[in-house]
Image (cartoon, helix red, strand yellow):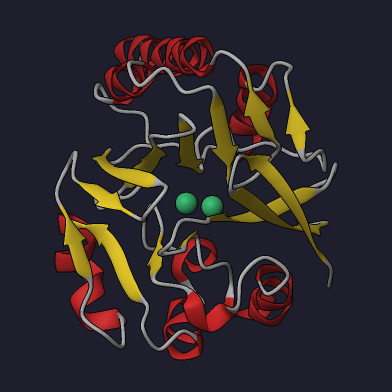
Amino acid sequence: MNTTVTEIADGIYRFSTLTDAIPGGFTFNQFLVKGDEPLLFHTGLKSTFESVCEAVRTVVPIETLRWVSFGHWEADESGALNGWLAAAPHSELAIGVFGTMLSGNDQATRPPRSLTDGEVLDLGGKRVRWIDTPHVPHGWDAGLLFEETTATLLCGDLFTQTGDAAITEGDIAGPAAALEDMMHSTALTPRTAPTLHRLAELRPSALALMHGPSFHGDGAAALHTLAADYQSRLERERESAEHR
Ligand SMILES: [Fe+2]
Ligand SMILES: [Fe+2]
């Protein structure tokens, strides 16, 4: 197993493990925000922990990790959590209020630091804001982090797509729609598109995808395009239900 390292924005590092889980190649990516208090976003699977550790170690000593965070409870997002908490004795899990209540208090070996919607963690040189996004892309506890100094949205499973590129300035909404056609991984609700339009108001200049390349460019436009795709899927579902 091989995990590659790319600095995708100033002080934000992507650790990427390519698998053949889906034809075209499928990546599992973790991100390190390198402030005075380093934060890891996504723990990765337990099965990739050693490989990701080795990659993170090329950027910071593991034991200096201060925060571990992720968008929702699911094996690729949170599976190796307790491995990281053990390897970095001063680290804390930082997740939203629902993630704390639904799973964190039970699953984590140390009590989580619970973040409210809009709350900022000052990492020293970097600032991450927690944003609640319930059921977007899936999971009641879902949320995301926005790094304010680089305008990078750590966008988790949003825009999930195949391929092994590290960075792109091209279209990411089209490839995401193609994989959604196959996998149906997104919870389509009346709140899906409005939540994405709200994220667009952050005007991110980088989107750090958990599965796919990191995007540089007009993040707001990409989020609006993704929102429009989900809204049309929801309307098609409604129409076909009415004709049943
Ligand atoms: Fe997920
Ligand atoms: Fe994921």
User: Relative to 107, is 24 above or below?
Assistant: above
Q: Quadrant of the C terminus?
A: top left
Residue 35 or residue 128, whichever sits in front: 35
Residue 125 or residue 131, whichever sits in front: 125
Q: Residue at x 40, y 89 (%)?
A: 89
User: Relative to 156, is 191 above or below?
Assistant: above
Quadrant location of residue 52?
Answer: bottom right
The location of residue 13, given as percent across then percent down, is 64, 51
Q: Residue at x 28, y 38 (%)?
A: 133
Total numbered circles: 0
Quadrant location of residue 18?
Answer: bottom right
Q: Residue at x 68, y 75 (%)?
A: 57
User: Relative to 140, is 66 above or below?
Assistant: below
Quadrant location of residue 190?
Answer: top left
Residue 56 or residue 191, whichever sits in front: 56
Q: Quadrant of the N terminus?
A: bottom right
The location of residue 62, given as percent across then percent down, is 57, 79
Q: Is residue 43 left or right of residue 181?
A: left
The location of residue 237, given as percent across then percent down, is 40, 18
Q: Is residue 234 left or right of residue 64?
A: left
Q: Is residue 112 left or right of residue 1?
A: left
Q: Is residue 240 left or right of residue 54?
A: left
Q: Residue at x 31, y 88 (%)?
A: 109
